[in-house]
Amino acid sequence: MGLGREQEVEIRKPPRLMPGERVRATRHIRNDGTYPGRQIGENLVRKGDEGYVRDIGTFLQQFYIYAVEWVDRGTVVGMRAHELMSLDQSGNPCGAEFTAGPNKGTAR
């Protein structure tokens, strides 16, 4: 009997995005109650908004959370990699390609 759907432990791999990287939101993000000063359900980020990764943290020792500054909105919102598309890395819609060569673990 399973305990639910198991998910990959994302932090075992290097982050897909790096601080300073320009990104675009791939979906609308609403406040789930964790963003202070805004109503639950209020839009924080709209699909297509562009911003910059400012910091990388983790959640539940399993997922990367990217603190993205949305300059036009004047906010910083924590987001997952699948909610973002890099604008600095052509040809890879949701993050960096990682190599196993001499620069192991670095983004191209």
Image (cartoon, helix red, strand yellow):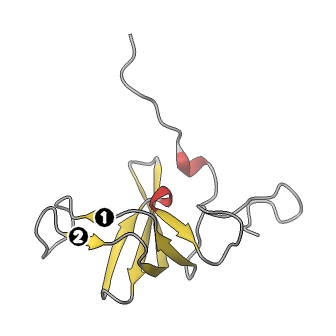
Label 1 neighbour load within 10 Å: few <14, some 14-19, many 20+: some
Q: Tell me the kind of residue under disc 1.
A: Ile
- In-front residue for pair 96/62: 96
Mark 2 is on which residue type? Asn
Image disc number at residue 29: 1
Residue 2 drawn above or below residue 48: above
Residue at 58% across, 79% down? 21
Which quadrant holds the N terminus?
top left
Measured from the top left, where is residue 12 in percent x and y? 60, 47
**Where does label 2 land, which residue?**
43
Residue 30 % position (x, y): 24, 64
The residue at 23%/70% (across/down) is 43
Marks 1 and 2: in contact by CB < 8 Å? Answer: yes
Q: Is label 1 in a helix, a strand or a loop?
A: strand
Q: Residue at x 64, y 78 (%)?
A: 88
Q: The residue tagged with tag 2: helix, strand or loop?
A: strand
- Determine the residue positioned at 16% across, 72% down: 36
